Amino acid sequence: MKKTVFLGALTIAGLAAGAAAAGTLDDVKARGTLNCGVTTGLVGFAAPDSNGEWNGFDVSVCRAVAAAALGDPTAVEFVPTTGKTRFTALASGEIDMLARNTTWTFSRDVDLKFEFVGINYYDGQGFMVPRDLGVSSAKELDGATVCIQTGTTTELNLADFFRANNISYEPVPIETNAEAQQQYLAGACDVYTTDASGLAATRATFENPGDHVLLPEIISKEPLGPLVRHGDNEWADIVRWTLNALITAEELGVTSTNIAELAAGTNNPEINRLLGTEGTLGEMLGLDAEWSKRAIMSGGNYGEIFAKHIGESTPIGLARGLNAQWTDGGLLYSPPFR
Ligand SMILES: N[C@@H](CCC(=O)N[C@@H](CS)C(=O)NCC(=O)O)C(=O)O
């Protein structure tokens, strides 16, 4: 008897915890804005323009989710976070999602209790040095001072790499990319190490980008993607399938230019399901039929977003590489819209 009462109490406690964690979509709708955690500023990925409007590859994911869930890609409150503050901001409920070059790791998922809903950029950690340092490999960096952002995976990878190669370094800990850039250009560190995409984005803002080289070593896997808290699967589904909609749209050739025409109906059933003219996928998510159409219209499909903000025709100049569609030899592969 006692045992039954005890179990009953536990079940109720469990349900209460579940209820407290759930309901992010309702909160977002009641508020009328999505609180999206981004970086403090990394041009190409997330940074305010001269009008104070946030723009970039990661920002586009926030806008797509706002378009899907609220019907308005501008209904986003961008919350700048550092490598250190991002996880508390998400865990505490200050933000509804984090879209900030954050690496999906075991401990962030299991220990910090976050759910990575997918990968929007397959990256790895690299090194940047001034060209006149005359270094051509990271293995030549014995005794170097290294600017490194605290609270990041890159801090741990750096230690591993130097230890494995029997060389030493002196860390110069910094909190934001702006600070890293300043310290590096002032010569406070010989090397700046972070995600290779972050290095390319940072170098692109230098007065003389050609004076700095990215070394050939990529020392880690940094699968970057948006994340939410554990405990609200319905919300996680919305963020996950919004990202998948952007990826699938590129695979199926749905672009910001032809979407209006395709949304009138096509003879490709998956395009029709994606755009809501066939099936009830939107309803299953607790949204309307046009959720993903709005998400894609907010900034284009994945390929359009990549090309506009960080691609080869931008100063950042990143090749698609691993981030090409699986049909083009890359790793981007959305599960089917069915
Ligand atoms: N992917 C790594 C590193 C992420 C990171 O902090 N990147 C820096 C350098 S690219 C950044 O985004 N800085 C922007 C900022 O300081 O707000 C992680 O998840 O720990």
Image (tube, helix red, strand yellow):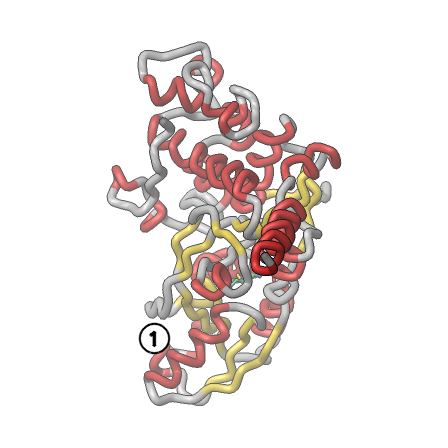
Q: Quadrant of ligand 1?
A: bottom right
Task: Locate residue 79, reporting x and y percent.
Answer: 69, 51
Q: Quadrant of the C terminus?
A: top left
Q: Residue at x 40, y 24 (%)?
A: 254
- In the picture shown, does residue 221 fall above or below 321? below
- For label 1, the crowd category at 10 Å Cα-Cα, with few meaning under 14, some 14 to 19 and many 20 or more, is some
Seen from this angle, which residue lies furthest top? 264
Task: Locate residue 229, reporting x and y percent.
Answer: 57, 52
Task: Locate residue 287, reporting x and y percent.
Answer: 56, 26
Count of picture labels: 1
Label 1 sits on what residue type? Answer: Ser
Judged from the image, the secondary structure of the residue bearing numbered disc 1 is: loop
Q: Is residue 263 visible?
A: yes
Q: Nearer the viewer, residue 271 or 288?
A: 288
Q: Quadrant of the N terminus?
A: bottom right
Q: Residue at x 42, y 50 (%)?
A: 121
Q: Is residue 18 left or right of residue 138?
A: right
Q: Is residue 36 visible?
A: no
- In the picture shown, does residue 74 fall above or below 58? above
Name the residue that disc number 1 marks: 136
Q: Residue at x 34, y 43 (%)?
A: 332
Q: Nearer the viewer, residue 17 or 278?
A: 17
- In the picture shown, does residue 169 fall above or below 234? below
